[in-house]
Image (spheres, grey):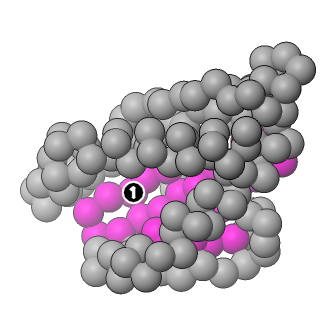
């Protein structure tokens, strides 16, 4: 999958009172915790996700998987790129950490996805159109901020 060719969905960001290395560690821990819940693996199976379980190197690195996502790039302290695919969508989440000064960072989460066919369009309305995706992303970034600080 060419991530750059996926349509842009949205971007969320938060400023964190912590250095990039602490944010990186907290991002990995938060993703592991969020995607380790039993419901996440069940949902990944239900929609036919390619990656349905957590596997591979830890902490997260290229080749690691989480239910619904595979890590395609990991530059510690800078960028984590996740991609996935299931029956209704092909998608990517790109996390970028920017150094803002001593003990200050910005974490940005960019979402990209395509939703092919009528079933994909319905899925998009359910996930993106209802605002559920935005709520989930803000909650995830808040978790990283709390864990970092």
Q: Is the magenta stretch mostly helix, strand or loop?
A: strand
Is 71 inside the magenta-drawn segment? yes
Residue 52, placed above or below residue 88: below
**Which of the 4 image quarters holds residue 78?**
top right
Q: Residues within 10 Å of mark 1 (few under 14, many from 20)?
A: some
Q: In the depicted view, which residue is nearer to us: 25 or 94?
A: 25
Residue 66, placed above or below residue 89: below
* Residue 19 shows in this picture: yes
Q: Where is residue 2 in the image (x, y as percent from the top left)?
A: 54, 48
Q: Position of residue 19 (x, y in %)?
A: 84, 33
Taking the spot 74% from the left edge, 28% from the top edge, the residue there is: 17
Taking the spot 32% from the left edge, 58% from the top edge, the residue there is: 89
Dot 1: element: strand
Q: Where is residue 39 in the image (x, y as percent from the top left)?
A: 37, 78
Please give left or right for residue 23 compared with residue 54 in the image: right
Residue 44, placed above or below residue 25: below
Please give left or right for residue 28 compared with residue 103 in the image: left
Please give left or right for residue 146 compared with residue 140 in the image: right
Taking the spot 26% from the left edge, 63% from the top edge, the residue there is: 88
* Residue 41 shows in this picture: no
**Residue at the extreme right of the image, as rendered:** 102
Q: Position of residue 12 (x, y in %)?
A: 48, 31
Taking the spot 77% from the left edge, 47% from the top edge, the residue there is: 24
Q: In the depicted view, which residue is nearer to us: 107 or 65?
A: 107
**Residue denoted by label 1:** 90
**Which of the 4 image quarters holds residue 42?**
bottom left
Query: Which residues lie in the magenta part?
Result: 64-92
């Amino acid at each position: 999958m060419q991530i750059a060719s996926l349509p842009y969905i949205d971007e969320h960001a938060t400023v964190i009172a912590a250095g990039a290395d602490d944010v990186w560690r907290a991002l990995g821990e938060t993703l592991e915790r969020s995607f380790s819940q039993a419901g996440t693996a069940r949902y990944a199976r239900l929609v036919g996700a390619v990656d349905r379980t957590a596997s591979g190197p830890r902490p997260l690195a290229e080749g690691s998987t989480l239910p619904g996502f595979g890590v395609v790039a990991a530059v510690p302290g800078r960028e984590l790129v996740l991609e996935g695919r299931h029956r209704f969508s092909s998608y990517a989440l790109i996390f970028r950490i920017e150094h803002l000064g001593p003990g200050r960072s910005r974490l940005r989460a960019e979402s990209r996805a395509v939703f092919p066919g009528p079933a994909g369009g319905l899925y998009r309305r359910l996930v993106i159109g209802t605002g559920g995706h935005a709520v989930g992303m803000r909650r995830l970034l808040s978790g990283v901020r709390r864990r970092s600080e």
